[in-house]
Image (cartoon, grey):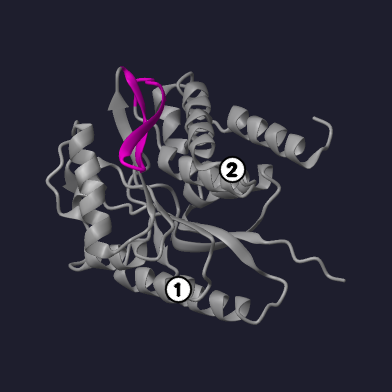
Amino acid sequence: MIIIKPSVLIAEDFSAVGRLSATAAIAVFSAFGLQTATLPTELLSTQTEGFGKPTTQNTDSFIRRATGHWNGLDDLQFNSGIVGYVGKISTANLLYDYLSGVSLPDLLIDPVLGDQGKMYAGFEPGYLDAIKRLASIATIITPNITELGLLSGERLRVNASDDRIHQAVTDYREATHSKAKVIVTGVHRDGGIGCVYVKGDQLKWAGSPLIGGHFYGTGDLFSALLVGYLNFNLDFDTAVQKAVIGVYDAVSLTSRTPQHQRKFGLNLTRSLYNVAKFTLGQTGEEV
């Protein structure tokens, strides 16, 4: 008998330098002992900040051919997936077409659209609508405050109150008929940083101490950790809190490095160690 092990689908940008996006996600899922299949949404020589203008390569042709090949493989099955930065309408539409037919129990989509109250520059007209359409098939979405405002049509400030966030989540779900869990990331509360999400009629908070500075790849790491923990059937609250702690561990180590080295991404050593220890404990193997 052939035992088919479910895999995690990763659809994110792939930076050839550093520990960011798809490269970080692959490392995280490997520590969870999970098989991975990766659809790079864009190839970059480096990330877009700190290295000058990177060389980029669109991957639409590869996505078409890779998914066509995967459709014919009986021993490749997905039970979860994450989608991060997409970049182009055509790529968003390809992912929508493919993921709509896969029916993943857990599909986390991070609608990377903007920050600090503004949409990122360089997107095509209509890109927001393409990401809204893609997000409609998610079981979990992880916007920051700015991205929640763009998705919901609410004018949200970075320091929006819990009531305003709760209303924006409600408005988004009602307008799109979405049943997805909405986790709002990068929220500051009481000297800490973390995320908020609606559970029942309440807005729940999961946070960690705030470490000053700019750190690249925290959202990508959070997504991978959360989906990894959910693969082990942890309850949602516990999985969110463990993902927050995992990001804190990475930021804490990275904060000890010189500022100019942080552009290479997060130091994942402690986060991966804790994931591997958790995984071995779950599988009954010696730690």
Label at residue 211: none
Residue at 39%, 60% (x, y): give it: 56
- Residue on which the image places disc 1: 100
Task: Compare residues 49 and 93 and report the one nearer the observer.
Answer: 93
Mark yes or no: residue 116 visible.
Answer: no
- Magenta stretch: includes residue 264: no
Q: Earlier in the sequence, mark 1 or mark 2?
A: 1
Image quarter in which the N terminus is found: bottom right
Disc 2 residue crowd, few under 14, some 14–19, many 20+, Cα 10 Å: many
Query: Residue 238 appears at what percent x and percent y?
Result: 53, 35
- Residue identified by numbered label 2: 229
Amino acid type for the residue under numbered disc 1: Ser
Q: Position of residue 78 (x, y in %)?
A: 61, 65
Query: Residue 274 at what x, y percent from top left?
Result: 64, 30
Residue interval drawn in magenta: 191-213
Q: Estimate how packed mark 1 is, as few (under 14), some (14 to 19) or many (20 or more) residues with alpha carbons within 10 Å.
A: some
**Residue at x 47%, y 75% (from the top left corner):** 98
Q: Is residue 71 above or below residue 158?
A: below
Q: Mark 2: which secondary structure?
A: helix
The amino acid beneath tag 2 is Tyr
Quarter holding residue 283: top right
Q: Element under label 1?
A: helix
Callout 1 touching callout 2 (CB < 8 Å): no
Q: How many marks?
A: 2
